[in-house]
Image: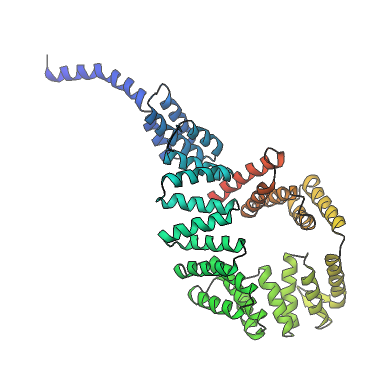
C-alpha cells in the first residue's frame, strides 16, 4: 500500500478519537475564549460543563475561581460567593479563593464578613501589603477607627503610602485627635502634593482652628501647580473672606465665576463678599444663582433680601423688571418660615408632598427636594434615605443615589423590604458608574 494512503487511513481512524477527546477536555478553553469576548454568561455554562464528573480538588478549585470571576463581572456577587465557598477547605485559607470571596462580600455590602476574611488572611500573611491595606480600609468603613489607625501606622512603618496616611488622619479625626490628624494629613500631602482631597481635609481642620493664613498659603501653593482646580480656589476665596480680606476674596471669587464655577458654595460666598463691599448688584446676581440651587437656607434668604433692599428699588434681568421691596418681603418671610417652623408639621408636610409627587405623579424632580426637606426635619425616619436615593437614581445621578443607599444600609435592618431594595439598587448604581468609567 502507498505510504501516503497508509498515513491518511490511520488519520481517518484517529480523528474521531481526537474529536471525542477534545469534547471531553475543551470546555475550559472554550470558557477562556468566551471570556476573551466578554461573553461571561456563556463562559459560566462552559465551566459548569467542565466541572461535571471532575474529582480532582485542584482542578475544581481553578474552575470555581474562573466561574466566580465571571459571576463578579456580571455583578452576581452572592452567586460568586457561593461558588467560592464551595471549594474552601478546612485549615489554612487559600489566599486566592478567600481574597476573591472577601471582595465579593465588599461588593455586596457584607463588610463585616469581608473584614473577618481579610483579618485572617493578614494574620497568615503578615508581610502582604495588599491584605493589610484592605483590612485597614474595612476597619474604617465599619467604624473601628482605633483599629484602622493602628493598622494604618503599621502599614506606613513598612512603606509610606499617601492614601494610608490620609486614612490614619481621617481615623484620628473621628477619634477627636485633631492635632494628630493634621500631622498625618500633612505627611500624605508631602508625599502627594497634588491631591486636592488632602488639601481640602487639611483646610477643614485649619478652618476649625481659624488658621486662615495657613489655608491661604497651602491653597495658593496648590493652585500654582494646578491652576484649574475650582474646589481649592473656592477654599482660598472663603479663607480670604473669613479673614476679612475682602478685596482679595473678591478677586478670587470673580475669577472662579469667570472660569464657570456656579456651585452653591462659590455663589453664596461670592454674594456675602460682594455684600460686604457694598457691590449690591453682584451680590444679588450671586445670591439669585445660589437660591436657584437651594431655596431652603434661611441665612441665604436673609442675605439675598438684604442685597435687594440696599440697592436700586428696581432692576432688570432677562427682560423682566423686578421690584426689590416685594421680592425682599417674600425672602424675609421665607427666612422666618425656614428658621422658626414647627419641625413636626414641616416634616409631615414635606413627606406628604414627596409621596404625592413620587407615587401619585411619578415626578422625581419635584419629589426629591421634599424628601430631602422631610429628612432634614426628621432624620430618624431612615426610610426617607431610600426614597431620596431612588429619586437620584431615576434622575441618573448614580453617585448621589449610591451614597444614600449605602447610608441607609448602615442603619437599616437586614431582611426588610427597604434594605433589600437599597442593596439591589446600590449594585445597579455601581454597575452604571462602572460603565461610565
Q: In this view, does 216 lie to the left or right of 188?
A: right
Find the residue positioned furthest to the left: 2
Residue placed at 55% from the left, 67% from the top? 180
Residue 248 x %, y %? 62, 84
* Quarter of image, res 268: bottom right
Q: Which of 8 and 136 is in front in this view?
A: 136
358 left or right of 229 in image: right
The image shows residue 100, relative to residue 363, as above or below, that is: above
Image position, residue 303 (x, y; %): 78, 75
Task: Report x, y in % for residue 436.
Answer: 54, 52
Q: Residue 340: name its quadrant.
A: bottom right
Rendered residue at 57%/60% (across/down) = 171
Query: Which residue is pictured at 79% across the width and 51% down the height?
Result: 354
Q: In this view, does 185 lie above or below 109?
A: below
Residue 290 is left or right of residue 35, and the answer is right
**Image quarter hosting the N terminus:** top left
* In the foreground, 47 or 86: 86
Which percent across, then down, holds residue 327? 84, 73
Q: Is residue 428 visible?
A: yes
Inspect this view and state whether residue 436 appears: no
How many numbered discs? 0
For residue 312, above or below residue 113: below
View extreme (top): residue: 1
Residue at point 59% right, 66% down?
177
Left/right placement of residue 274 relative to residue 127 reads right
Amino acid at each position: 500500500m502507498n505510504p501516503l494512503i497508509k498515513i491518511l487511513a490511520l488519520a481517518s481512524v484517529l480523528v474521531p478519537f481526537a474529536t471525542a477527546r477534545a469534547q471531553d477536555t475543551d470546555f475550559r478553553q472554550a470558557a477562556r475564549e468566551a471570556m476573551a469576548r466578554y461573553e461571561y454568561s456563556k463562559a459560566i455554562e462552559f465551566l459548569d460543563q467542565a466541572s461535571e464528573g471532575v474529582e480532582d480538588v485542584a482542578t475544581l478549585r481553578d474552575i470555581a475561581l474562573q466561574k466566580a470571576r465571571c459571576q463578579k463581572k456580571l455583578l452576581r456577587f452572592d452567586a460568586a460567593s457561593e461558588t467560592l465557598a464551595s471549594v474552601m477547605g478546612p485549615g489554612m485559607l487559600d489566599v486566592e479563593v478567600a481574597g476573591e470571596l472577601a471582595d465579593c462580600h465588599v461588593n455586596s455590602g457584607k463588610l463585616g464578613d469581608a473584614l473577618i476574611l481579610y483579618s485572617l488572611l493578614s494574620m497568615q500573611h503578615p508581610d502582604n501589603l495588599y491584605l493589610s491595606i484592605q483590612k485597614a480600609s474595612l476597619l474604617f468603613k465599619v467604624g473601628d477607627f482605633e483599629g484602622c489607625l493602628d493598622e494604618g501606622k503599621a502599614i506606613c512603618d513598612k512603606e509610606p503610602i499617601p492614601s494610608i496616611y490620609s486614612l490614619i488622619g481621617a481615623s484620628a479625626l473621628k477619634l477627636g485627635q485633631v492635632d494628630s490628624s493634621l500631622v498625618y494629613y500633612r505627611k500624605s500631602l508631602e508625599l502627594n502634593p497634588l491631591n486636592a482631597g488632602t488639601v481640602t481635609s487639611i483646610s477643614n481642620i485649619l478652618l476649625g482652628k481659624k488658621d486662615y493664613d495657613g489655608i491661604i498659603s497651602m491653597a495658593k501653593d496648590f493652585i500654582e501647580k494646578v491652576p484649574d482646580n475650582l474646589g481649592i480656589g473656592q477654599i482660598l476665596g472663603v479663607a480670604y473672606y473669613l479673614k476679612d480680606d475682602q478685596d482679595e476674596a473678591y478677586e478670587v471669587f470673580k475669577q472662579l465665576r469667570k472660569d464657570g464655577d456656579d456651585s452653591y458654595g462659590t455663589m453664596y460666598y461670592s454674594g456675602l463678599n460682594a455684600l460686604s463691599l457694598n457691590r449690591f448688584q453682584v451680590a444679588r446676581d450671586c445670591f439669585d444663582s445660589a437660591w436657584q440651587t437651594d431655596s431652603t437656607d434661611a441665612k441665604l434668604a436673609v442675605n439675598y433680601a438684604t442685597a435687594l433692599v440696599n440697592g436700586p428699588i428696581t432692576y432688570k434681568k432677562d427682560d423682566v423688571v423686578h421690584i426689590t421691596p416685594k421680592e425682599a418681603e417674600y425672602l424675609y418671610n421665607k427666612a422666618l418660615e425656614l428658621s422658626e417652623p414647627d419641625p413636626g408639621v414641616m416634616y409631615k408636610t414635606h413627606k406628604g408632598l414627596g409621596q404625592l409627587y413620587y407615587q401619585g405623579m411619578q415626578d422625581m424632580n419635584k419629589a426629591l427636594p421634599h424628601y430631602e426637606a422631610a429628612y432634614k426635619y426628621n432624620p430618624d425616619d431612615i426610610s426617607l434615605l431610600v426614597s431620596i436615593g431612588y429619586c437620584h437614581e431615576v434622575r441618573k445621578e448614580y453617585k448621589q443615589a449610591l451614597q444614600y443607599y449605602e447610608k441607609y444600609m448602615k442603619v437599616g435592618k437586614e431582611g426588610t423590604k427597604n434594605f433589600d431594595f437599597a442593596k439591589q439598587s446600590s449594585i445597579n448604581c455601581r454597575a452604571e458608574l462602572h460603565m461610565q468609567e
